[in-house]
Amino acid sequence: MSEITSSIHPESKPSGGFSFDNAQRNTMIEQAAASSNAVLPMATKTGTTIVGLVYKGGVVLGADTRATGGSEVAEKNCEKIHYMAPNIYCCGAGTAADTEKTTELISSQLELLRMNTGKESRVVTACTMLKRMLYRYQGHISAALVLGGCDINGPHVYQIYPHGSTGKLPYTTMGSGSLAAMSVFETGWTEGMEEEDAVKLVQRAILAGIFNDLGSGSNCDTCVLRTDGTVQYTRGAVTPNETQPLRDTINHSDRLNMGPGTTVVL
């Protein structure tokens, strides 16, 4: 910027530091809402623990099965590991509808691409499609994803944030229980792990999220994708919160059971 321009428009010079331009506006909005008893909209807290890691012979994905709506548990056994292609699966955290429809849409596009090319889908292709879609909506689609699969280039795990940024990592966690799960991964992950050890580590990581995060809970699902093309998707691989044995030990009084004919039919 020239000296002449800067002297004519001194306000156009960039300023450093933090910007508090909206501080006065936010105070006025809060005061107006309080005087009229209005309720300001708030972001809905979502809870999930999803993980993925690369081992010697493929990829292991894991997820809990609790779906929450704010502070209420809406579903105790939902599926958070979504099918993308025969060799690619994707874990989703965030808004359930966003994760399901996002993975469903990209899965359809991958199938059309396979029909057109006659070749197996590549994991980086799925990652590119997902990140481009999420970036287009600037984070308003609440879908934090862990993408995993095996192709001709080997096993791959990607983390994809709602605003479209991605990272290719040997192991990763996402969701509200990600910190607890990451502590398990950073302690126990080693390069070239065997499949049995990798599955157990994923289960431990999900259980860490289940027991240390209120937004995560219920059971642990796992999905093993091997470089030979086989897939093993296990629903309820670990069920630490099984309540049926406890319920069976409780004897309820028969006085609470209303048999046929108890109520008179008029």
Image: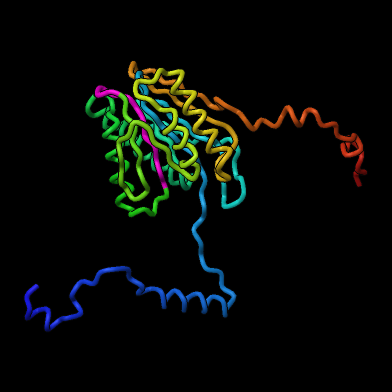
Residue 172 is situated, as x and y percent measured from the top left of the image, at 39, 36
Name which quarter of the figure residue 149 lies in.
top left
Q: In this picture, is 117 found above or below 256?
A: above
Q: Is residue 157 left or right of residue 152?
A: right
Residue 10 seen in this snapshot: yes
Q: Nearer the viewer, residue 145 or 265?
A: 145
Which residue is at a point 48% across and 36% down the rendered structure image? 181
Name which quarter of the figure residue 5 lies in.
bottom left
Q: Nearer the viewer, residue 121 or 250?
A: 250
Instruction: Work out which residue is located at the far top of the displayed protein and give it.
Output: 228
Instruction: Work out which residue is located at the far bottom of the displayed protein and give it.
Output: 8
What is the total number of numbered labels drawn onto the structure image?
Answer: 0
Residue 100 seen in this snapshot: no
The question of residue 12 being in magenta is answered with no
Quadrant location, the N terminus:
bottom left
Residue 22 is situated, as x and y percent measured from the top left of the image, at 38, 73
Magenta stretch: give its range: 143-154
Q: Is residue 47 left or right of residue 106?
A: right
Residue 126 is situated, as x and y percent measured from the top left of the image, at 30, 35
Which residue is at a point 52% across and 68% down the rendered structure image? 40
Prevalent SS, magenta region: strand
Q: In this picture, is 217 found above or below 137?
A: above
Residue 138 is situated, as x and y percent measured from the top left of the image, at 33, 54
Which residue is at a point 41% across and 27% down the rendered structure image? 189
Which residue is at a point 34% across and 50% down the rendered structure image? 163
| Coloring basis for residues | rainbow
The question of residue 152 being in magenta is answered with yes
Q: Nearer the viewer, residue 29 or 204?
A: 204
